[in-house]
Every structure is written in C-alpha cells, then in structure tokens.
Amino acid sequence: MLIDSHCHIDLMDYEKLGGDPDTAVAYAHENGISHMLCVSVNLEQYPNMLNTIDEMPNVFASVGVHPNEQDGLDPSVEQLVELADNKKVVAIGETGLDYFRSEGDLEWQRDRFRRHIEAAKQTGKPLIIHSREAKEDTIKLLQEENAQDIGGVMHCFAEDWEMAQQAMDLNFYISFSGIVTFKSAKTLQDVAKRVPLDRMLVETDSPWLAPMPFRGKTNQPAYVKYVAETIAELRNDSVDSIATATTENFFRLFDSAKP
C-alpha cells in the first residue's frame, strides 16, 4: 500500500489521460495507491477542488495559496482557519517561497507564508511547504515563526542534504517526487539514500513531474509507485519497506486522515 502525499487531481489534463477524476483515482487504487492528498494552490479553485473529491473515499485535501499566485485572493489567517474547518482538509498549504518564478521585492510572499504558518498553528493542521531557489529564506522564516511547533512536509524536495537536515530538525518530513527518478538528479538521490525512513514521504505532484519512464507526459497518482521503486533501489531496500514506512509517516503527520 502506497500513499500519494501530494497531487492535484482537480488540475489534471483528462483529455490527455482519458477518463475523469474518478477514473484516475480508480486507476491509482488498482496500482496499490490507497490514499491521496489533493493540494490547494489558490482559493478561486478551492471550492471546485473540494467538490471534485467530496465523494472520493480516502482522498483528502489541503487549503492554501501557492507562493507564485499573485492575481487571486490573498487570504487572512482567519480566512484560512475558517476554510480549513472541513472534514476533508488535513493540512495547510501549499505555501512557502519561490524565487525561481517570481522577481522583485518578494516580501508579499514571505508575509503570506507567515500567515499560513499561523493558520496551521491555530488549526493544529500541518504545513505543506513549497520551496524553490529559496532554501535559506525558507528555513529562516520557519525558524522565526516557530513552525516546528506544528511541523509538516517539505513537498517535492529538490535541494541538498544540508537543507533536508535543517528541515527535519524543524519537525518536517521530506517528500520525494518523480524528480528522484531522473538520471540527472544525483544530489537529490543522495538525499533519498540518507533521509531516515521514519521521516520520508512520497508523492507525484501530478499532473506535473511525471517520473521515469513517463517523463514529459501527464503525471497521475498511480505513478507514485515509480518514485517508491526508485528510492528502494537507491537504498538497497524493498518497495514494501518504503511503502510501509511512508504510509505510517503519512498518518502520523496527517493524523486527521487516519481511518
């Protein structure tokens, strides 16, 4: 049994995949993926996301605004707390810092990040962190805001061992996506070998970042098994061991998703 700890079922291109969200979830179940976490990127699409997964057993949600989203609603702490009051919502995010796509004075990103951390503390729901080319500021802000009090996951981790250690010291899990299957991802593969099994999650971030052998195509939750297989190979471990550990970790972190 595996869990896709980060996907975007509502944003997938079903013309390319064939079928619809129910088809994708059924296909994931057929491939041994028992649970999925559908992650919010903005509040304009949030109601549709919840509606899409409402009747899907074992598919959960988060609420938050991606750090690159600039044109839509920028929520207050109070709004995030209110929206998180839903039986499907088990996390706050995705939130964080992205200096790759955004330029100029990015204090607005840091301010939004702080609000998400405070909402996570108030709701008791862990954080889903997006960090790209902002590792120093991400760690600094997490430290300043005492994010270790609530913890969470560094989603789609693509940095080095130093950042992984700093994040784990702050009570965060490290989640690996299809990037770890890419031949060029040597630094990340080294991290995957070294992260303790009890601090690891796996994800697809679908519809993006499809793992080998589907690189460049539309990703989907079923493909998380290829991430687990690659990590098992890197660690000279079994897929069953990776699956068991990451499943236990998922329910330890997102405890409101427990059966």
Image (cartoon, helix red, strand yellow):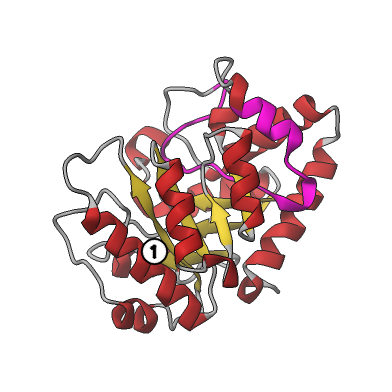
- Is residue 45 found left or right of 232 in the rendered image? left
Judged from the image, the secondary structure of the residue bearing numbered disc 1 is helix
Quarter assignment of residue 114? bottom left
Residue 206 shown in magenta? yes
Residue visible at 22% across and 64% down in the picture: 44
In the image shown, does 39 or 127 lie closer to the viewer? Answer: 127
Residue 19 in sight here: no
Q: In the image, which residues are magenta?
A: 188-213
- Is residue 155 found left or right of 32 in the rendered image? left
Residue 110 shown in magenta? no
Kindly give the residue lying farthest to the top in the view shown: 183
Residue visible at 61% across and 59% down in the picture: 170
Tag 1 residue: 52
Q: Position of residue 126 (x, y in %)?
A: 54, 68
- Is residue 233 found left or right of 121 in the rendered image? right
**Residue 37 higher or lower than 106, as above or below:** below
Q: Position of residue 192 (x, y in %)?
A: 69, 34
